[in-house]
Amino acid sequence: MNVTIVDYNSGNISSVINSFKEVAKDKVNIEVTSDLTKIKSSDKVVLPGQGSFKSCVDALNSISGLIDTLNEFAINHKKPLLGICVGLQMFADTGYEEIETKGLGWIPGKVSKLDNKNGKYKLPHIGWNEINIIKDSKIFQGIENNSHMYFVHSYEFIPVDKNVISATTDYSSNIVCSVEKENIFGTQFHPEKSDKMGLQIIRNFISL
Amino acid sequence: MLKNRIIPCLDVKNGRVVKGINFVDLKDAGDPVEQAKIYSDGGADEICFLDITASNENRDTIYEVVKKTSKKCFVPLTVGGGVRSVEDINKLLNCGADKVSINTAAVQNFKVIIESSKKFGSQCIVVAIDAKLNGDQWEVYTHGGRNNTNIDAIEFAKKMEDSGAGELLITSMDRDGTQIGYDIDLMSKISSKVNIPLIASGGVGNLDHLVDGIKLGKASAVLAASIFHYGKHSVQEAKEYLDSKGIPVRI
């Protein structure tokens, strides 16, 4: 099996690579590439993302044919795809970080800034927070409710259809932190930095 | 609920730990990778490496350390010490650091913070401020505490937030190494002034100091070195103590 981590200059993806390789050992081949042919032929795709919504969308657009290839992979062929952090946020129609920016539009909704309640809450939302699992997602197998995951973000994905939400977390508000829509999975937190529980989520995704 | 973080810090020189855990069963007490792994397995919420390598020719040793550690530890790794440029930050991130802490370079040229936070995202840019109380104001020191810049530390902290820092690591030079506790005044004044998380550092001698750093100093995270290194307390003990005092921690 081939799992491809999309390398599109979206910031630091070393930790994502390390964690997938740790889980995969020698049994699963982990590719890190922006090569469209390789993405097309892989079994699963991981879409990481750091920095701003706009910088990530721009980076996707700067590789000719990449968005079409991802659409084909996830929407036409319905093969499993995992978005992490801004990778998840880009599933939305629109993001509002820096400037209004069009997303991939895979899951209707928008990405807007967390409400810091007039400075009562620090932003970014950094650190370990508990996740409330509200949907029996395949990537949560073996994960207990209220497990801690590592977060670093100032923006949140607000999907139109609440049925896609698989977990939330509580900070300044109730934040969507995981979504699942058919073959498309996303986590706002960083499974690659969430120790054993995070690696379990990666293992679950690889074994889908 | 978001948990307060406990961050053990390891001083690394020429690729070796100089202040670290001193357990009898440790195979190689100088190996930063082994020490970081012990901490992450023991419940550390993040690991911090402070590179104190003095000579330029050995500067590259930290990159190897970060590379190896990031393949073994799956909690966030912050690396600081001698970070001068956007290129240095890029190299550390590529080696597997999740955050880079910047001290002297942030004072000398704050554009490094603007540029790097734009390029890599604020989430990985930590500005480390070494502050010392002179008269009635805390002043920023650079070059490992050797040079006084006469810059007001509280104003500087605000400026770093505005420049794109995602977090501040505040060390009280008056308290560092004393084991008499964090400079609570300094921490709470900065924390009230900025809207980004603050990591308190310098002066921890017992577990109550960690409690004070969070409750009184309003820090989101507490960094400590010696109380963990010499087996005085484990990270787990620290967390259980904080929990008993009503502070939310990841246990």
Image (cartoon, rainbow, N blue to C red):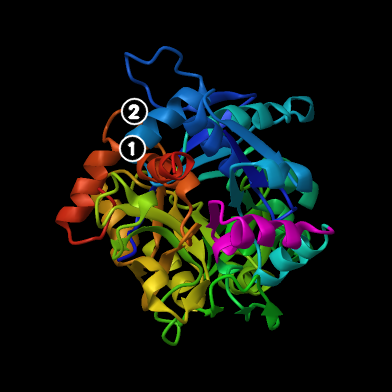
- Residue B69 in the image: above or below residue B223: above
Disc 1 marks which residue? B227
Name the side, left or right, on which B247 lies relative to A104. Answer: left
Q: Residue at x 34, y 35 (%)?
A: B228
Q: Indicate the quadrant containing the N terminus of chain B: top left, top right, bottom left or bottom right.
A: bottom left
Q: Is residue B83 visible?
A: no
Q: Quadrant of residue B165?
A: bottom right
Q: Position of residue B243 (x, y in %)?
A: 19, 54
Question: Residue B22, labelled with which disc?
Answer: none
Q: Chain of mark 2?
A: B
Name the side, left or right, on which A91 lies relative to B240. Answer: right
Three-letter code, disc 2: Tyr
> What segment carries the magenta color?
A64-88
Kindly indicate whether the residues beneath marks 2 and 1 are on one polypeptide chain. Answer: yes
Q: Position of residue B151 (x, y in %)?
A: 66, 67
Q: Residues within 10 Å of mark 1 (few under 14, many from 20)?
A: many
Badges 2 and 1: C-beta atoms under 8 Å apart? Answer: yes
Three-letter code, disc 1: Ile
Q: Chain of mark 1?
A: B
Q: Residues within 10 Å of mark 2 (few under 14, many from 20)?
A: some
- Residue B200 in the image: above or below residue B159: above
Q: Nearer the viewer, residue A153 or B126?
A: A153
Disc 2 marks which residue? B230
- Residue A168 in the image: above or below residue A70: below
Q: Is residue B216 visible?
A: yes
Instruction: Determine if the magenta segment contains residue A71.
Output: yes
> Residue farthest to the left?
B244
**Secondary structure beneath label 1:** helix
Q: Quadrant of residue A98?
A: bottom right
- Residue B229 in the image: above or below residue A205: above
Q: Position of residue B173 (x, y in %)?
A: 51, 51
Q: Position of residue A161 (x, y in %)?
A: 43, 79
